[in-house]
Amino acid sequence: MLFRSVTISITDGNEIITITVVVDSNGDWSSTFDLSSLDDTQLTVTALETDAGGNTDTDVATFEKQSNLPILTIDDPLESDNIVNADEVSTVTVSGEGEDGLTVSFVVTDSMSNTVPGSALVSGTTWSSDVNLSTLVDGTLTITATEPDGIGNEATASQIGRAHV
């Protein structure tokens, strides 16, 4: 049976977006939907197909919408004074806040582009990891952190400190 049109309705339980599309001669159709007005929650998609004779067929599917970035911060200052000295360089604590259960990956980079990577699991709302920065040169240090949420959203944060070793 060749369908003439498909009416797609997407709802978050509060608001409904509805678009009707024409089916081509091969029975194919496509459309783009702006879901920005719908809440981040489980969405229900209903497709109502209608053929030239007025006969209908319905299909329903659900998916999760999550467009908010996870929370991610890096504590400031680094090592209480934002300076990593010779006594601290072998055990520098990099910490911050994030979303419980997610993993924060970070890289500490010096002015010569040397790097030291690290990671930590967020517990509650905090994360923390000790890293050895003795391979980095004196000067400005940049910490860049990322926290992916597993569904394609990734928070980023950065912090600048100084090293004097």
Image (cartoon, rainbow, N blue to C red):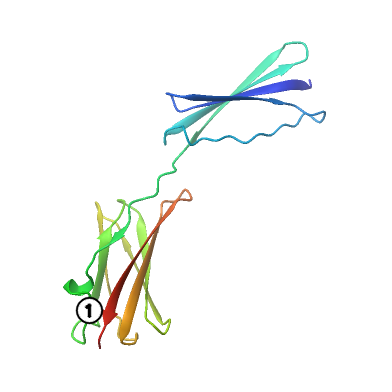
For disc 1, the neighbor class at 10 Å (few under 14, some 14 to 19, many from 20) is many
The quadrant where residue 21 appears: top right
**Mark 1 — residue?**
83
Residue 10 coordinates in the image, percent (x, y): 53, 27
Q: In this view, does 49 lie to the left or right of 60?
A: right
Picture residue at 44% right of the left edge, 43% below the top: 67
Of 164 and 24, nearer the camera is 164
Which residue is situated farthest in the right direction here? 25
Please give left or right for residue 119 compared with residue 62 in the image: left
Determine the residue positioned at 37% across, 68% down.
144
The quarter of the image holding the N terminus is top right
Rendered location of residue 134, percent (x, y):
30, 86
Work out whether 96 lies above or below 116.
above
Tell me the SS state at disc 1: strand
Q: Find the residue positioned furthest to the top.
A: 54
Q: Is residue 24 above or below residue 142?
A: above
Q: Quadrant of residue 59?
A: top right
Displayed quadrant of residue 161: bottom left
Q: Residue shown at 81%/31% (left/top)?
A: 26
- Percent x, y of residue 47: 62, 24
